[in-house]
Image (cartoon, helix red, strand yellow):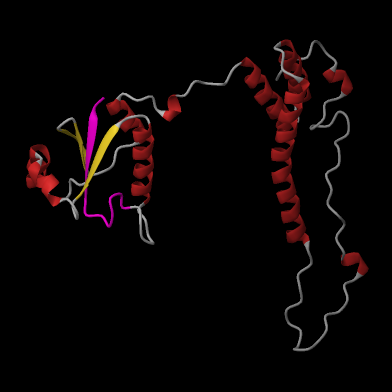
Amino acid sequence: MKTIQVFDPALCCSTGVCGVEVDQALVGFAADVGWAQGQGAKIERFNLAQQPMAFAENPAVNGALERAWPDLLPLIVLDGRVAMSGRYPTRDESAQWLGLANATDAPSIFNAQVAELVAIGAAIAANCEPCLEFHHAKAKELGVSAADMRRAVDVAQKVKEAPARAMLQLAQRRLEPASVTSKPAGAKAAPAQADAKLPTIAVASAPAGSCCRPAPAAAAKGAPRCC
């Protein structure tokens, strides 16, 4: 396996991940180094503040820094040759150099059954009755259990209800009577009039045949299909 050598600028410690204000680029790279080393990769880091001789004794690093010091740091050396300068590599780049399978290249679990569960959840979120009928039938054909379909429905409903609740709360706040702010000190606010009280905003089911609920005759035409 190839070796990566990282020549860091002057850092407070070996990784630079310390102190109150931490550079997020250093945090991300430290995590990437730990990930690569966990898979057997060889990555060495040299800190200019603590290991200046490593910079001077490496011909590739010494030559590069003589041309554009100090803008090249950090300097990434791959098997003795400068591969990158001025920034830290991404995990994808490090994985490619080292011949590692990136975490994003893990085997896919998105199969036909999962696709139908996603479609069932989307049908719930979209209030699409034909879609739900269609994908429920397809999921049953593929052997998806009723319990898994129920989980998909429950998750979709929770996701769907969250913005609906937020919208209702926003409407309630916007429609509340304005509070009296010009009363003298110590004065009591006048009791609210009975007709000033807002009715509770509720979501009512749409009548059959409306835009949000197809008429029974329309839903009964032909075999169930997804829109």
Depth order, front residue of 137/185: 137
The x, y position of residue 21, in whole percent, is 37, 60
The x, y position of residue 28, in whole percent, is 38, 44
Q: Quadrant of residue 110?
A: top right
Q: Residue at x 38, y 33 (%)?
A: 38
> What is the chief secondary structure element of the magenta stretch?
loop
Depth order, front residue of 196/186: 186
Q: Is residue 22 above or below residue 65?
A: below
Q: Residue at x 76, y 88 (%)?
A: 184
Q: Is residue 134 above or below residue 164?
A: above
Q: Is residue 217 magenta?
A: no
Depth order, front residue of 49/215: 49
Q: Is 104 situated left or right of 214 in this image?
A: left
Q: Quadrant of residue 81?
A: top left
Depth order, front residue of 189/59: 59
Q: Quadrant of residue 176?
A: bottom right
> Which span of residues is magenta-colored?
1-16
The C terminus sits in image quarter: top right
- Point out the residue furthest to the bottom here: 185
Q: Residue at x 88, y 19 (%)?
A: 217
The x, y position of residue 9, in whole percent, is 21, 51
Q: How many marks?
A: 0
The x, y position of residue 112, in whole percent, is 62, 15
Q: Is residue 11 magenta?
A: yes
The N terminus sits in image quarter: top left
Q: Is residue 175 above or below residue 221?
A: below
Q: Residue at x 73, y 78 (%)?
A: 181
Q: Is 127 situated left or right of 65 in this image?
A: right
